[in-house]
């Protein structure tokens, strides 16, 4: 999955429209301590990066808009 796809899935999860797999994955990433987040990153690097970028954004909704999500 590309970083842009991961950000889109994160948006869908955040707004209650994510698929089951990614909804569970983003929930797990959010609950994971730093060690386990690194473990998840081994298998899902772009998903973890998208989560970290979103968590560090000053404005989460602006973060999605900056990345063109939701797209028209």
Image: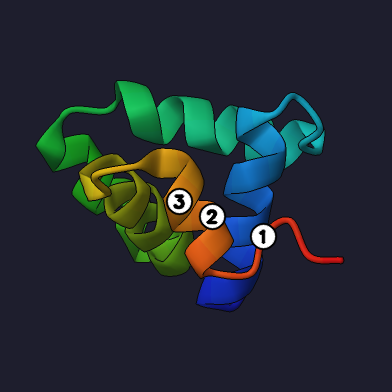
Label 2 residue SS: helix
Within 10 Å of the Cα at label 1, are there few (<14), some (14-19), or many (20+) other Cα atoms? some
Residue 56's disc is: none
Q: Residue furthest left?
A: 35
Tell me residue 28's x, y (percent).
Answer: 44, 28
Residue, disc 2: 64
Q: How is the image coloured?
A: rainbow
Tell me residue 48's x, y (percent).
Answer: 37, 54
User: Which numbered disc flags the more N-terminal residue, 1 or 3?
Assistant: 3
Label 3 residue SS: helix
Q: Is residue 54 above or below residue 20?
A: below
Q: Residue furthest right?
A: 72
Distance between the alpha carbons at the discs numbered 3 and 2: 5 Å
The quadrant of the rendering that contains the C terminus is bottom right
Q: Residue at x 76, y 37 (%)?
A: 18
Tell which tag, 3 or 2, sits nearer the viewer: 3
Q: Residue at x 49, y 25 (%)?
A: 27
Q: Is residue 59 left or right of residue 63?
A: left
Task: Give the number of callouts.
Answer: 3
Residue, disc 3: 62
Distance between the alpha carbons at the discs numbered 1 and 3: 9 Å
Residue, disc 1: 69
Contact, mark 1 vs mark 2 (Cβ under 8 Å): yes
């Amino acid at each position: 999955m590309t970083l842009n796809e991961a950000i889109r899935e994160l948006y869908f999860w955040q707004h209650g429209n994510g698929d089951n797999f990614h909804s569970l994955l983003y929930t797990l990433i959010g609950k994971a301590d730093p060690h386990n987040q690194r473990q998840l990153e081994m298998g899902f690097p772009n998903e973890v990066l998208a989560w970290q970028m979103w968590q560090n954004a000053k404005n989460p909704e602006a973060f999605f808009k900056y990345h063109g999500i939701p797209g028209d």
